[in-house]
Amino acid sequence: MDLDTSHPAISDLRLSARRRMPKFAFEYLDSGTGSEIGVTRNRAALDAVLFMPAILGGTQTADLSRRFMGRDHPLPWGIAPIGMSGMIWPGAEEILARSAVAHGIPYSISSVATRTPEEIGPVAGDLGWFQLYAPADPEVRRDMIRRIGAAGFDKLILTVDVPGESRRERQRRAQVVMPPRLTPKMVLSMLLHPVWTLSMARTGAPRLKFAESYVDPAQLKRDPFVHAGRVIRGYPDWDYLRAVRQEWAGDLLVKGVQRPEDAVRLVEEGVDGIWVSNHSARQFEAGPAAIDRLPLIRSAVGPDVPIVFDSGVEGGLDIMRGLALGADMVFLGRAFHYAVAALGAAGAAHVNHILEADMRANMAQLGAVTLEDLKDCLVKP
Ligand SMILES: Cc1cc2nc3c(=O)[nH]c(=O)nc-3n(C[C@H](O)[C@H](O)[C@H](O)COP(=O)(O)O)c2cc1C
């Protein structure tokens, strides 16, 4: 059976991922926070963005290319940073970096991924973006920033929407703990998912390798996760942002922006790109849907500031919604990780196929030929 029949949508990849992953790993990937009303709100708000179909447009071929921050991209989407991606599926970082290069889309690696910048930089080439959680110690920050640049990354994403931990009750119920602890329940779950477990045995237990390199070896032996986790657990403020701006010579994007006034101030502080996101309601469930913030932020910063959008994107139609409402690029985090867990490298390629086919099919319904046409196809309230 071909993948378009077995997995026509990202929701099919999610179901396969759930079957192949131990429960704690799937729950870590899939859950929002609280009662998950924020996840539902993101979905409902995306669904509420409507387009007007057109007739008698003749034969048209959509152009999906996008110029973003000085580079031409054949497709207007990319892969969002996901922490511990090597626990979701062993080797996920390499798989996704390679796939991104093959499709010409950006791959963002998280500072709490299981690989270092030096390992992934050469694989991702100029499509690699690096996401930074703020290290508390300025010396560590400076060295991390130096290493990220030296590894070949020219885009740094500073994530600012984690001002504290979120309770994520669903993850607590599933006993998702960092470091993963070998409880009887977890061992049973691993035995029931032998492909994941054997792949993990081959690649080695997931570790926060980048942060670990700043931990004293004696402490590392005792409790690698706790100590590595502390390295990156800083909560940045505006002064911190200014320091990062001074220390990082490449493009700087700030991720997790929801207020127009923050976006304006970020641009004034010299930030190059705004990443509108509510972390897919993993942090806070009583906030507005991320897609509803996007047009407000676009109109506040004007047409020229690069904007990335994520949070709840599940197909090509959602990408069109983000682009129509003001984003230049739309990123997906969970979709690519469901795909790798479901089908390995073939899964990442299949997500790109689904997104492209879905966008082309839906743009044809609108008679939209370029991405710029999309905003004119919106049904205005
Ligand atoms: C399992 C998981 C881990 C994440 N880890 C990070 C991270 O390390 N850094 C970060 O900036 N965002 C992180 N995010 C947020 C994503 O980058 C993204 O904003 C969010 O998942 C929305 O996209 P999606 O709905 O397509 O998954 C994480 C999200 C998930 C689901």
Image (tube, grey):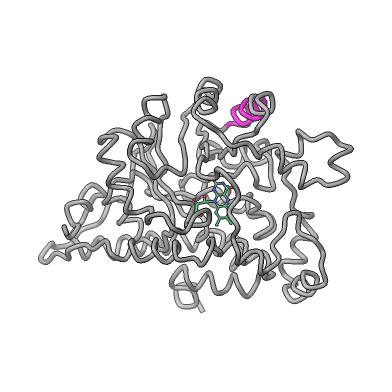
- Furthest toward the top, the residue is 246
Reply yes or no: does residue 151 show up in magenta. yes
Which residue: 62% across, 61% down? 28
The reply, left or right, for residue 21 in relation to residue 97 is right
Which residue: 33% across, 61% down? 46
Q: Which residues are magenta?
A: 143-152
Residue nearer the viewer, 112 or 109: 112
Which residue: 72% across, 59% down? 177
Picture quadrant where residue 196 is located: bottom right
Which residue: 39% across, 48% down? 309
Residue nearer the viewer, 172 or 323: 172
The reply, left or right, for residue 179 in relation to residue 73 is right
Residue 194: image location, x then y, percent: 75, 72
Residue 91: image location, x then y, percent: 68, 54
Reply yes or no: does residue 63 show up in magenta. no
Residue 188: image location, x then y, percent: 79, 75
* Res. 346 in view: no
Against 271, residue 260 (above or below) is: below
* Res. 273 in view: yes
